[in-house]
Amino acid sequence: MNIYVGNLPYAISHEEVKSVFSAYGEVAAVRLVKDRETGRAKGFGFVEMHDDAQAKAAIEAMNGQEIGGRKVVVNEARPREPRPQA
């Protein structure tokens, strides 16, 4: 299951996010989104967990919790919507 994690501190690392979510099960991947032009973090990312039960436990436990002084928003990621072609 792919999990959306929003309102992350801009300076957080992949390892820190993986460590937090590993408490609920095996983390397959972490992807923090960065601005293409500046390379700065945008404050959100995605955590992939293969086991849906572990992923749901992580969502329930982590939504609204503080990471680095910020209350994070955690929920199941929705599929990306197609962008209109320019």
Image (tube, helix red, strand yellow):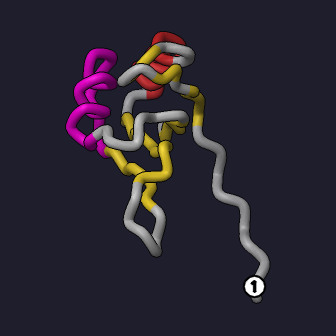
Nearer to us in this view, 43 or 83: 43
Q: Is residue 6 left or right of residue 16?
A: right
Q: Amino acid at mark 1?
A: Gln
Q: Position of residue 76 (x, y in %)?
A: 59, 33
| Residue at left offset 48%, top offset 14% | 65
Nearer to us in this view, 7 or 26: 7
Q: Answer above or below: position of 3 versus 29.
A: above
The image quadrant that residue 40 belongs to is: bottom left
The image quadrant that residue 80 belongs to is: bottom right
Nearer to us in this view, 36 or 81: 36
Where's the C terminus, which quadrant? bottom right
Q: Is residue 15 left or right of residue 33?
A: left
Q: Which residues are magenta?
A: 13-29
Q: Is residue 38 magenta?
A: no
| Residue at left offset 31%, top offset 33% | 17
Q: Answer above or below: position of 13 versus 72.
A: below
Q: Position of residue 32 (x, y in %)?
A: 39, 50
Outermost residue, bottom direction? 86
Instruction: Look at the numbered disc 1 and give the secondary structure of its residue.
Output: loop
| Residue at left offset 57%, top offset 27% | 73
Q: Is residue 79 left or right of residue 62?
A: right
Nearer to us in this view, 10 or 59: 10
| Residue at the disc numbered 1 | 85
Q: Position of residue 77 (x, y in %)?
A: 59, 41
Q: Is residue 17 magenta?
A: yes
Q: Answer above or below: position of 75 versus 65.
A: below
